[in-house]
Image (cartoon, rainbow, N blue to C red):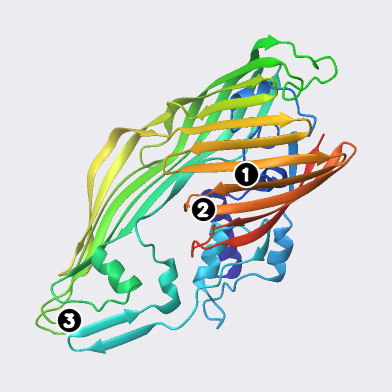
Amino acid sequence: MDRKRCALILLLAAALLPSASEAQSLNARRLGMGGVVTSDNGDRSGVNIAFRAVPPSLEGSSTIPLPLGLIQYANDHPTFDSGDSTFNIYEIMNVVLNPPFTIQIQKPKAVSGDISVYLAQDSLQVDLSDVRRVIPAGSAMNGGVYHLGGVGKGFGKVFVLVSPLVHIRNSFTLSDELRAALRDAVPFQGRTRYGLTDEGRAQAAIAFQAGVAWRAIHRSGAQEDEIPDPRRNGSTALYLGAGPKYLWGLAYADAQGAAGLTTGDTLFSDQNPVSLDAITRSRHAVIGGDGGSGTGYGSDVGAVLYLRNFEVGLGLNDLGSQIRWKTTVRQYVYDDSTNEFVTSTIEKDTKYTSRIPVTTTVNVAKRIGRTTLAGDVVAGELNTTLHAGAELWFGKLALRGGTYRDQNELWQVAGGAGVRFGKIGLDAAVATNSRNIERERGTELSASLSLY
Protein backbone atom coordinates (compact mmCIF):
# COMPACT_ATOMS: atom_id res chain seq x y z
CA MET A 1 0.00 0.00 0.00
CA ASP A 2 1.52 3.34 -1.04
CA ARG A 3 1.82 6.32 1.29
CA LYS A 4 -0.96 8.36 -0.33
CA ARG A 5 -3.50 5.56 -0.09
CA CYS A 6 -2.52 4.75 3.50
CA ALA A 7 -2.74 8.43 4.47
CA LEU A 8 -6.22 8.68 2.91
CA ILE A 9 -7.45 5.67 4.89
CA LEU A 10 -6.05 7.13 8.10
CA LEU A 11 -7.72 10.48 7.42
CA LEU A 12 -11.10 8.80 6.90
CA ALA A 13 -10.60 6.67 10.00
CA ALA A 14 -9.72 9.75 12.04
CA ALA A 15 -12.99 11.35 11.01
CA LEU A 16 -15.19 8.32 11.62
CA LEU A 17 -13.64 6.01 14.18
CA PRO A 18 -14.12 6.44 17.91
CA SER A 19 -11.16 7.39 19.98
CA ALA A 20 -9.78 5.58 23.01
CA SER A 21 -11.13 8.31 25.24
CA GLU A 22 -12.85 11.60 24.52
CA ALA A 23 -13.08 13.14 21.10
CA GLN A 24 -10.32 15.61 20.38
CA SER A 25 -11.30 19.22 21.12
CA LEU A 26 -10.12 22.07 18.89
CA ASN A 27 -11.93 24.66 21.02
CA ALA A 28 -9.07 25.94 23.18
CA ARG A 29 -11.36 27.96 25.44
CA ARG A 30 -13.48 24.95 26.34
CA LEU A 31 -10.47 22.61 26.54
CA GLY A 32 -8.71 25.00 28.94
CA MET A 33 -11.71 24.66 31.26
CA GLY A 34 -11.40 20.87 31.29
CA GLY A 35 -13.81 20.38 28.38
CA VAL A 36 -16.79 21.51 30.45
CA VAL A 37 -19.98 22.50 28.62
CA THR A 38 -21.61 25.89 29.15
CA SER A 39 -23.98 27.89 26.97
CA ASP A 40 -21.17 30.21 25.86
CA ASN A 41 -17.92 28.26 25.54
CA GLY A 42 -18.64 25.47 23.09
CA ASP A 43 -20.98 24.18 20.45
CA ARG A 44 -24.06 26.23 21.30
CA SER A 45 -26.39 24.10 19.18
CA GLY A 46 -24.96 20.58 19.28
CA VAL A 47 -24.80 19.92 23.03
CA ASN A 48 -28.13 21.42 24.06
CA ILE A 49 -30.62 22.59 21.45
CA ALA A 50 -32.01 25.20 23.86
CA PHE A 51 -28.67 27.04 23.75
CA ARG A 52 -29.69 28.29 20.29
CA ALA A 53 -32.15 30.74 21.84
CA VAL A 54 -29.80 32.21 24.45
CA PRO A 55 -28.27 35.60 23.51
CA PRO A 56 -24.52 35.62 22.75
CA SER A 57 -22.22 35.89 25.73
CA LEU A 58 -20.10 38.92 26.53
CA GLU A 59 -17.14 36.51 26.61
CA GLY A 60 -17.74 35.27 23.07
CA SER A 61 -19.55 32.20 21.76
CA SER A 62 -18.09 31.44 18.31
CA THR A 63 -14.82 29.61 17.77
CA ILE A 64 -12.50 29.11 14.80
CA PRO A 65 -10.04 26.21 15.36
CA LEU A 66 -6.36 26.55 14.48
CA PRO A 67 -5.03 23.06 13.57
CA LEU A 68 -1.41 23.85 14.40
CA GLY A 69 -0.64 20.18 14.91
CA LEU A 70 -0.58 19.68 11.14
CA ILE A 71 2.68 21.65 11.04
CA GLN A 72 4.23 19.35 13.63
CA TYR A 73 2.91 16.29 11.81
CA ALA A 74 4.41 17.45 8.49
CA ASN A 75 7.86 17.52 10.12
CA ASP A 76 7.50 14.39 12.26
CA HIS A 77 5.12 11.62 11.23
CA PRO A 78 5.17 7.81 11.33
CA THR A 79 6.67 5.78 8.52
CA PHE A 80 3.99 4.18 6.35
CA ASP A 81 6.37 1.91 4.43
CA SER A 82 6.28 -1.50 6.12
CA GLY A 83 9.67 -2.26 4.63
CA ASP A 84 11.30 0.63 6.46
CA SER A 85 13.25 -0.25 9.62
CA THR A 86 11.43 2.52 11.53
CA PHE A 87 7.93 1.25 10.62
CA ASN A 88 5.76 0.96 13.74
CA ILE A 89 2.10 -0.01 13.34
CA TYR A 90 1.27 1.28 16.82
CA GLU A 91 2.42 4.79 15.94
CA ILE A 92 0.14 4.70 12.90
CA MET A 93 -2.79 3.55 15.04
CA ASN A 94 -2.17 6.47 17.38
CA VAL A 95 -2.55 8.84 14.44
CA VAL A 96 -6.01 7.34 13.90
CA LEU A 97 -6.95 7.59 17.57
CA ASN A 98 -5.40 11.04 18.01
CA PRO A 99 -5.64 13.05 14.75
CA PRO A 100 -2.71 15.49 14.36
CA PHE A 101 -4.69 18.72 14.71
CA THR A 102 -3.19 19.68 18.08
CA ILE A 103 0.48 19.98 18.97
CA GLN A 104 1.72 16.94 20.89
CA ILE A 105 3.86 18.25 23.75
CA GLN A 106 4.38 14.92 25.45
CA LYS A 107 3.64 11.61 23.77
CA PRO A 108 3.29 8.28 25.59
CA LYS A 109 6.30 6.03 25.29
CA ALA A 110 6.04 4.27 21.94
CA VAL A 111 5.37 0.54 21.93
CA SER A 112 8.58 -1.17 20.89
CA GLY A 113 10.90 -4.00 21.90
CA ASP A 114 11.60 -7.54 20.80
CA ILE A 115 9.08 -10.39 21.02
CA SER A 116 10.48 -13.59 22.49
CA VAL A 117 9.11 -17.05 21.66
CA TYR A 118 10.24 -20.12 23.59
CA LEU A 119 9.53 -23.47 21.90
CA ALA A 120 9.78 -27.13 22.88
CA GLN A 121 7.84 -30.25 21.87
CA ASP A 122 5.30 -29.70 24.60
CA SER A 123 5.98 -26.11 25.53
CA LEU A 124 5.19 -22.71 24.02
CA GLN A 125 5.66 -19.38 25.74
CA VAL A 126 5.31 -15.97 24.10
CA ASP A 127 6.78 -12.89 25.76
CA LEU A 128 5.41 -9.80 23.99
CA SER A 129 7.58 -7.48 26.08
CA ASP A 130 6.45 -3.86 25.61
CA VAL A 131 3.54 -4.89 23.35
CA ARG A 132 1.72 -6.11 26.47
CA ARG A 133 0.75 -2.50 27.12
CA VAL A 134 -1.74 -2.52 24.23
CA ILE A 135 -3.52 -5.68 25.40
CA PRO A 136 -6.51 -4.66 27.56
CA ALA A 137 -6.96 -6.17 30.99
CA GLY A 138 -10.69 -6.59 30.24
CA SER A 139 -13.04 -6.03 27.32
CA ALA A 140 -12.02 -3.23 25.00
CA MET A 141 -15.11 -1.14 24.23
CA ASN A 142 -15.14 1.90 22.01
CA GLY A 143 -17.82 3.86 20.28
CA GLY A 144 -20.00 6.90 20.21
CA VAL A 145 -22.44 9.01 18.22
CA TYR A 146 -20.81 11.62 16.04
CA HIS A 147 -22.58 14.59 14.46
CA LEU A 148 -20.04 15.60 11.83
CA GLY A 149 -20.76 19.27 11.30
CA GLY A 150 -23.65 20.30 9.09
CA VAL A 151 -25.29 23.20 7.28
CA GLY A 152 -28.14 25.15 8.85
CA LYS A 153 -30.07 28.40 8.91
CA GLY A 154 -32.07 30.16 11.59
CA PHE A 155 -35.26 32.15 11.06
CA GLY A 156 -35.94 33.80 14.41
CA LYS A 157 -37.01 31.05 16.77
CA VAL A 158 -37.12 28.45 13.99
CA PHE A 159 -34.12 26.74 12.41
CA VAL A 160 -33.36 24.05 9.82
CA LEU A 161 -30.26 21.87 9.79
CA VAL A 162 -28.78 19.13 7.62
CA SER A 163 -25.96 17.13 9.18
CA PRO A 164 -24.20 13.74 8.81
CA LEU A 165 -24.52 11.29 11.69
CA VAL A 166 -22.32 8.29 12.46
CA HIS A 167 -22.82 5.74 15.23
CA ILE A 168 -20.07 3.20 16.00
CA ARG A 169 -19.79 0.61 18.74
CA ASN A 170 -17.29 -2.20 19.13
CA SER A 171 -16.53 -4.66 21.92
CA PHE A 172 -13.48 -6.93 21.74
CA THR A 173 -12.77 -9.58 24.38
CA LEU A 174 -10.01 -12.14 24.80
CA SER A 175 -10.67 -15.34 26.70
CA ASP A 176 -9.00 -15.56 30.11
CA GLU A 177 -6.60 -18.20 28.77
CA LEU A 178 -5.52 -16.17 25.73
CA ARG A 179 -5.20 -12.94 27.74
CA ALA A 180 -2.96 -14.67 30.27
CA ALA A 181 -0.79 -16.14 27.52
CA LEU A 182 -0.33 -12.81 25.72
CA ARG A 183 -0.44 -10.29 28.54
CA ASP A 184 1.26 -12.27 31.31
CA ALA A 185 3.42 -14.64 29.21
CA VAL A 186 1.77 -17.70 30.81
CA PRO A 187 2.87 -20.83 28.84
CA PHE A 188 0.30 -22.34 26.49
CA GLN A 189 -1.31 -25.53 27.81
CA GLY A 190 -2.59 -28.70 26.12
CA ARG A 191 -6.32 -29.42 25.78
CA THR A 192 -7.12 -25.73 26.13
CA ARG A 193 -9.09 -23.37 23.90
CA TYR A 194 -7.63 -19.90 23.34
CA GLY A 195 -10.31 -17.67 21.90
CA LEU A 196 -11.65 -14.21 21.33
CA THR A 197 -15.00 -12.58 20.59
CA ASP A 198 -15.89 -9.36 18.84
CA GLU A 199 -19.18 -7.51 18.48
CA GLY A 200 -19.41 -4.44 16.30
CA ARG A 201 -22.02 -2.11 14.90
CA ALA A 202 -21.77 0.88 12.58
CA GLN A 203 -24.37 3.02 10.87
CA ALA A 204 -24.36 6.28 8.96
CA ALA A 205 -27.20 8.62 8.09
CA ILE A 206 -28.06 12.15 7.02
CA ALA A 207 -30.27 14.03 9.52
CA PHE A 208 -32.73 16.60 8.19
CA GLN A 209 -33.91 18.63 11.16
CA ALA A 210 -36.37 21.47 11.68
CA GLY A 211 -36.77 22.85 15.19
CA VAL A 212 -37.60 25.74 17.43
CA ALA A 213 -35.81 27.31 20.39
CA TRP A 214 -37.33 30.12 22.42
CA ARG A 215 -37.43 31.93 25.74
CA ALA A 216 -40.40 30.45 27.62
CA ILE A 217 -40.14 32.34 30.94
CA HIS A 218 -38.59 35.71 31.71
CA ARG A 219 -38.40 37.94 34.77
CA SER A 220 -36.17 41.00 34.68
CA GLY A 221 -33.04 41.21 36.78
CA ALA A 222 -31.53 44.16 38.57
CA GLN A 223 -28.85 44.74 35.90
CA GLU A 224 -30.81 43.83 32.78
CA ASP A 225 -30.83 47.39 31.42
CA GLU A 226 -27.02 47.50 31.61
CA ILE A 227 -26.19 43.88 30.76
CA PRO A 228 -28.32 42.06 28.14
CA ASP A 229 -26.69 38.71 28.91
CA PRO A 230 -29.04 36.54 31.09
CA ARG A 231 -25.99 34.70 32.40
CA ARG A 232 -24.83 37.80 34.30
CA ASN A 233 -27.68 40.28 34.76
CA GLY A 234 -29.45 38.51 37.62
CA SER A 235 -32.63 37.81 35.62
CA THR A 236 -34.72 34.65 35.67
CA ALA A 237 -35.12 33.04 32.26
CA LEU A 238 -36.03 29.61 30.94
CA TYR A 239 -35.09 28.66 27.38
CA LEU A 240 -36.51 25.58 25.67
CA GLY A 241 -35.68 23.82 22.43
CA ALA A 242 -37.03 20.90 20.42
CA GLY A 243 -36.15 19.60 17.00
CA PRO A 244 -37.61 16.50 15.33
CA LYS A 245 -35.51 15.08 12.52
CA TYR A 246 -35.88 12.77 9.58
CA LEU A 247 -33.05 10.24 9.25
CA TRP A 248 -32.01 9.02 5.83
CA GLY A 249 -29.95 5.91 6.47
CA LEU A 250 -26.95 5.45 4.18
CA ALA A 251 -25.48 2.24 5.55
CA TYR A 252 -25.83 -0.20 8.43
CA ALA A 253 -23.71 -3.18 9.46
CA ASP A 254 -23.27 -5.31 12.53
CA ALA A 255 -21.32 -8.47 13.21
CA GLN A 256 -20.87 -10.92 16.05
CA GLY A 257 -17.95 -13.26 15.81
CA ALA A 258 -15.97 -15.77 17.81
CA ALA A 259 -12.74 -17.53 16.94
CA GLY A 260 -10.19 -19.65 18.69
CA LEU A 261 -7.76 -22.51 18.61
CA THR A 262 -7.82 -25.61 20.77
CA THR A 263 -4.57 -27.36 21.59
CA GLY A 264 -4.20 -31.13 21.60
CA ASP A 265 -2.69 -33.41 24.19
CA THR A 266 0.75 -32.39 22.94
CA LEU A 267 1.28 -28.88 21.61
CA PHE A 268 3.39 -29.93 18.63
CA SER A 269 2.42 -33.34 17.29
CA ASP A 270 1.06 -34.67 13.98
CA GLN A 271 -1.31 -36.95 15.84
CA ASN A 272 -2.85 -34.13 17.87
CA PRO A 273 -2.86 -31.00 15.68
CA VAL A 274 -4.24 -27.69 16.85
CA SER A 275 -7.85 -27.27 15.75
CA LEU A 276 -9.19 -23.90 14.65
CA ASP A 277 -12.74 -22.61 14.89
CA ALA A 278 -14.39 -19.37 13.77
CA ILE A 279 -17.95 -18.25 13.18
CA THR A 280 -19.33 -14.82 12.35
CA ARG A 281 -22.87 -13.65 11.68
CA SER A 282 -23.38 -10.30 9.99
CA ARG A 283 -26.32 -8.08 9.10
CA HIS A 284 -26.06 -5.23 6.62
CA ALA A 285 -27.83 -2.79 4.31
CA VAL A 286 -26.36 -0.07 2.13
CA ILE A 287 -27.63 2.55 -0.27
CA GLY A 288 -27.15 1.32 -3.82
CA GLY A 289 -26.60 -2.24 -2.60
CA ASP A 290 -28.26 -4.96 -0.54
CA GLY A 291 -31.41 -3.61 1.10
CA GLY A 292 -30.89 -0.05 -0.10
CA SER A 293 -31.16 2.98 2.17
CA GLY A 294 -33.05 3.22 5.45
CA THR A 295 -35.57 5.70 6.82
CA GLY A 296 -36.27 6.81 10.36
CA TYR A 297 -37.01 9.58 12.81
CA GLY A 298 -35.53 11.08 15.93
CA SER A 299 -35.40 14.26 17.98
CA ASP A 300 -33.29 16.56 20.12
CA VAL A 301 -34.74 18.37 23.12
CA GLY A 302 -33.22 20.69 25.67
CA ALA A 303 -33.77 23.28 28.38
CA VAL A 304 -31.58 25.80 30.19
CA LEU A 305 -32.55 27.89 33.22
CA TYR A 306 -30.87 31.09 34.44
CA LEU A 307 -31.57 32.19 38.00
CA ARG A 308 -29.52 34.92 39.67
CA ASN A 309 -26.50 34.25 37.48
CA PHE A 310 -26.78 30.50 38.02
CA GLU A 311 -27.14 28.26 34.93
CA VAL A 312 -28.45 24.71 34.75
CA GLY A 313 -29.03 22.94 31.46
CA LEU A 314 -30.32 19.59 30.26
CA GLY A 315 -29.79 18.37 26.69
CA LEU A 316 -31.06 15.10 25.22
CA ASN A 317 -29.71 14.34 21.76
CA ASP A 318 -31.06 11.58 19.50
CA LEU A 319 -34.03 10.94 21.76
CA GLY A 320 -36.09 8.10 20.26
CA SER A 321 -33.90 8.03 17.14
CA GLN A 322 -34.22 4.87 15.07
CA ILE A 323 -33.84 3.78 11.45
CA ARG A 324 -35.74 1.04 9.60
CA TRP A 325 -33.79 -1.11 7.13
CA LYS A 326 -34.20 -4.11 4.84
CA THR A 327 -31.18 -6.19 5.78
CA THR A 328 -29.27 -9.21 4.56
CA VAL A 329 -27.98 -11.67 7.17
CA ARG A 330 -25.04 -13.90 6.39
CA GLN A 331 -23.06 -16.46 8.34
CA TYR A 332 -19.40 -17.33 7.88
CA VAL A 333 -18.12 -20.60 9.38
CA TYR A 334 -14.53 -21.77 9.20
CA ASP A 335 -14.12 -25.41 8.12
CA ASP A 336 -10.94 -26.72 9.72
CA SER A 337 -10.82 -29.75 7.44
CA THR A 338 -10.76 -27.72 4.18
CA ASN A 339 -9.10 -24.59 5.61
CA GLU A 340 -11.86 -22.44 4.09
CA PHE A 341 -14.76 -20.27 5.21
CA VAL A 342 -18.24 -21.44 4.24
CA THR A 343 -20.63 -18.53 3.57
CA SER A 344 -24.39 -18.88 3.75
CA THR A 345 -27.19 -16.33 3.43
CA ILE A 346 -29.59 -16.72 6.35
CA GLU A 347 -32.05 -13.90 5.58
CA LYS A 348 -32.72 -11.54 2.68
CA ASP A 349 -34.56 -8.18 2.77
CA THR A 350 -35.55 -8.78 6.39
CA LYS A 351 -37.03 -5.76 8.17
CA TYR A 352 -34.79 -4.51 10.97
CA THR A 353 -34.84 -1.39 13.15
CA SER A 354 -31.59 0.06 14.46
CA ARG A 355 -31.41 2.63 17.22
CA ILE A 356 -29.20 5.64 17.83
CA PRO A 357 -28.38 5.82 21.57
CA VAL A 358 -29.34 8.94 23.51
CA THR A 359 -26.61 11.30 24.72
CA THR A 360 -27.59 13.19 27.88
CA THR A 361 -25.75 16.31 29.00
CA VAL A 362 -26.40 18.03 32.32
CA ASN A 363 -24.43 21.20 32.96
CA VAL A 364 -24.29 23.76 35.76
CA ALA A 365 -22.46 27.07 35.98
CA LYS A 366 -22.22 29.98 38.39
CA ARG A 367 -20.99 33.40 37.32
CA ILE A 368 -19.60 35.81 39.86
CA GLY A 369 -18.54 39.05 38.26
CA ARG A 370 -16.32 37.97 35.37
CA THR A 371 -15.57 34.58 36.90
CA THR A 372 -17.29 31.39 35.72
CA LEU A 373 -17.36 28.13 37.70
CA ALA A 374 -18.83 25.20 35.79
CA GLY A 375 -19.31 21.44 35.74
CA ASP A 376 -21.13 18.84 33.66
CA VAL A 377 -22.00 15.17 33.32
CA VAL A 378 -22.24 13.59 29.86
CA ALA A 379 -23.84 10.14 29.69
CA GLY A 380 -23.54 8.16 26.47
CA GLU A 381 -24.05 4.58 25.34
CA LEU A 382 -20.87 3.15 26.84
CA ASN A 383 -19.82 5.45 29.64
CA THR A 384 -20.31 8.64 31.60
CA THR A 385 -17.73 11.43 31.60
CA LEU A 386 -17.35 14.28 34.06
CA HIS A 387 -15.91 17.78 33.53
CA ALA A 388 -15.25 20.73 35.82
CA GLY A 389 -13.53 24.03 35.16
CA ALA A 390 -13.21 27.74 35.82
CA GLU A 391 -12.54 30.91 33.83
CA LEU A 392 -11.35 34.25 35.24
CA TRP A 393 -11.16 37.47 33.21
CA PHE A 394 -8.74 40.26 34.06
CA GLY A 395 -9.48 43.06 31.62
CA LYS A 396 -8.66 41.62 28.17
CA LEU A 397 -6.89 38.54 29.60
CA ALA A 398 -8.56 35.27 30.61
CA LEU A 399 -7.08 32.45 32.71
CA ARG A 400 -8.64 28.99 32.69
CA GLY A 401 -8.24 25.66 34.43
CA GLY A 402 -10.12 22.39 34.76
CA THR A 403 -10.18 18.63 35.05
CA TYR A 404 -12.15 15.75 33.54
CA ARG A 405 -12.55 12.00 33.79
CA ASP A 406 -12.24 10.42 30.38
CA GLN A 407 -13.65 7.21 28.90
CA ASN A 408 -10.67 5.26 30.20
CA GLU A 409 -11.70 6.41 33.71
CA LEU A 410 -8.50 8.44 34.05
CA TRP A 411 -8.58 11.94 35.53
CA GLN A 412 -6.99 14.50 33.24
CA VAL A 413 -5.99 18.12 33.87
CA ALA A 414 -6.14 21.20 31.66
CA GLY A 415 -5.25 24.86 31.73
CA GLY A 416 -5.14 27.76 29.34
CA ALA A 417 -5.35 31.46 28.65
CA GLY A 418 -6.95 33.86 26.21
CA VAL A 419 -6.44 37.44 25.12
CA ARG A 420 -8.97 39.66 23.39
CA PHE A 421 -8.20 42.14 20.60
CA GLY A 422 -11.43 44.02 19.89
CA LYS A 423 -13.88 41.65 18.18
CA ILE A 424 -11.46 38.74 18.00
CA GLY A 425 -9.47 36.79 20.58
CA LEU A 426 -6.72 34.19 20.66
CA ASP A 427 -7.05 31.20 22.99
CA ALA A 428 -4.57 28.48 23.87
CA ALA A 429 -4.88 25.44 26.14
CA VAL A 430 -2.67 22.62 27.39
CA ALA A 431 -4.35 19.40 28.51
CA THR A 432 -3.54 15.78 29.20
CA ASN A 433 -5.41 12.91 27.54
CA SER A 434 -5.28 9.15 27.01
CA ARG A 435 -6.29 9.06 23.33
CA ASN A 436 -3.73 6.47 22.35
CA ILE A 437 -3.53 2.74 21.92
CA GLU A 438 -1.46 2.40 25.10
CA ARG A 439 -4.15 4.23 27.13
CA GLU A 440 -1.45 6.28 28.83
CA ARG A 441 -1.30 10.02 29.46
CA GLY A 442 -0.04 12.39 26.83
CA THR A 443 -0.11 16.20 26.69
CA GLU A 444 -1.36 18.40 23.86
CA LEU A 445 -1.56 22.09 22.97
CA SER A 446 -4.70 23.42 21.30
CA ALA A 447 -5.27 26.88 19.82
CA SER A 448 -8.34 28.66 18.44
CA LEU A 449 -9.80 32.09 17.69
CA SER A 450 -12.85 33.49 19.50
CA LEU A 451 -15.30 35.93 17.93
CA TYR A 452 -16.96 38.53 20.18
Q: Secondary structure at mark 1?
A: loop
Tag of residue 419: none
Report the residue marked by disc 2.
Answer: 19
| Count of all numbered marks drawn on residues in the image | 3
Q: Is residue 252 left or right of residue 31?
A: left
In this view, the residue in front, 336 or 423, is 423
Residue 82 appears at what percent x and percent y?
Answer: 52, 77
Residue drawn at x 54%, y 58% is 434
Q: Secondary structure at mark 2?
A: loop
Residue drawn at x 80%, y 39% is 393
Type of residue at label 2? Answer: Ser
Residue 148 appears at what percent x and percent y?
Answer: 58, 41
* Residue 58 found in image quarter: top right
Report the residue marked by disc 3.
Answer: 267
Residue 154 appears at what percent x and percent y?
Answer: 69, 22
Residue drawn at x 81%, y 37% is 451
Q: Is residue 313 left or right of residue 267?
A: right
Q: Earlier in the sequence, mark 2 or mark 1?
A: 2
